Amino acid sequence: MKNAVISSTGSYLPETIIHNEELTQFPQASKMIISQKTGVFARRSAAEDECTSDLAVKSARNCLEKIGFPAEKIEGIIVSTSSPDRIQPATATRVQHMLGAGNAFAFDINSVCSGSTFGISLADALIKTGQYNNILFIASEVYSRILNKKDFSTYPFFGDGSGAIFFQAGNSSGVLHSCLRTDGSGAETICVPGGGSMMPYEKIKHPKFAFFKMNGKKVFNFAVSKGTEIILQLIEEAGVSLKDIRCFVCHQANVNIILKIAEKIDVSPDNFYMNLFRYGNTASASVPIALDEAISKGVISKGDLAVTAAFGGGLSWGANLIEI
C-alpha cells in the first residue's frame, strides 16, 4: 500500500495588508482587544478582482513550480473552502481549468476551518486505493466577502489566503494516520445562516443573516477541548510519542487557543508553528499556509514528524500525523 507523500507545498496571500490600526470602523480602544484576545495584528484582503478560485490557482502554481510538475499530469484536485466562488458549480472546476489540469477530476469539500485535516486524510485515502498516483489538495478562503465589516465579533479576526499541498504515491513517509470527528448538534455555532435551501436569498429578512457568524466563547472552549483531545487520540492510535513530533501545525484561529492546547498536552509552545499574527484566521487555508511556511523556513525538514490539527464549523475537528 502506497502512502500519500508530500512532494511540495505552496501558498498565496493577497497583497493588501490591513493592520489593526486601519480598522477605523471600530473604536480606537478596541484595537488592543483584538491583539490581546487573539494575537492578530494584521490580515490580508483579496483584491476586488480576486475570488476564491484565483487565490487557489496562485497557491497551486507556487506549489507545482517548486518541483516543476506539469499541471496536465495532475490526476485529482480537491479544494477545501467555506467561502466558495458560487453555490455551484464547485470552485475546484474553475481551478482545474485555470491551472490547465484538464486530465484531473476536481471537487470541493467544506468542513469549514477543519477542511485541511479532512482534505489531507481524503487525499491520502485516494492514493492508498492504488487508483491514483497524485492528488493536489488546496484550501482557499476569501472570508472578507462573507463578513460584516462592522461586526467586531468576527471581522477583525479573519483574513484571506490559500495554501496547497501536492501529494504523490510513495513507499515511505507521508501521511501516517488521521483522526476526523464531527458533532452536528453544534451546527448553529459557526455558520452563514442565509443563502442556501434553508433560507434562500429572497427569504433573508435581515442583512445579518447573509453574513458569517459565530459564538466566540463557545468556539474557544470547543477548540481547546477538542483540539487537545484529537491530538492525544492521534498520537495514541499512531503509536508514537509527543516527544517524537518535531512540529505541531494547528489551525491559526487564536494564539490563546494554541497556547492552551500546548499547556494541556504538556508540550512547549515553541513546538507549535504560528503565523496568525500576520494573517489572522484564514479558515481551512491556515494549516496549509502555515505548513508551507514551516517547511520553507526549515522549521520542518525531510524525515521529521509533524502533526496538523484543526477545529471549526460543523462542529468538526481533525488531526493528521505526517512524516515529511
Image (tube, rainbow, N blue to C red):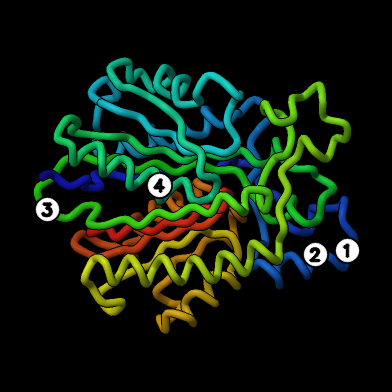
Q: Which residue is mark 3?
A: 172
The count of marks equals 4
Q: Amino acid at mark 1?
A: Gln
Q: Which residue is mark 2?
A: 31
Badge 1 density bin: few <14, some 14–19, many ≥20, Cα 10 Å: few
Q: Residues under labels 3 and 1: Cα distance?
A: 53 Å
Give the label, 2 or 3, closer to the camera. 3
Q: Which residue is mark 4?
A: 118
Disc with the residue nearer the chain's start (2 vs 3): 2
* Label 3: which secondary element: loop
Q: Where residue 169 appears, x then y in whole percent? A: 16, 40
- For the question of whether residue 261 can be seen, the reply is yes
Q: Which residue is mark 1?
A: 28
Give the label, 3 or 1, closer to the camera. 3
Could you tell me if the residues under marks 4 and 1 are in contact, i.e. CB atoms within 8 Å? Answer: no
Residue 292, placed above or below residue 52: below
Looking at the picture, tell me which residue is in the foreground, 134 or 318. Answer: 318
* Label 1: which secondary element: loop
Disc with the residue nearer the chain's start (4 vs 1): 1
Residue 301, placed above or below residue 7: below
Looking at the picture, tell me which residue is in the foreground, 265 or 244. Answer: 265
Q: Where residue 276 appears, x then y in whole percent? A: 57, 60
Disc with the residue nearer the chain's start (3 vs 1): 1
Q: Where residue 259 appears, x then y in whole percent? A: 53, 76
Residue 227, placed above or below residue 123: below
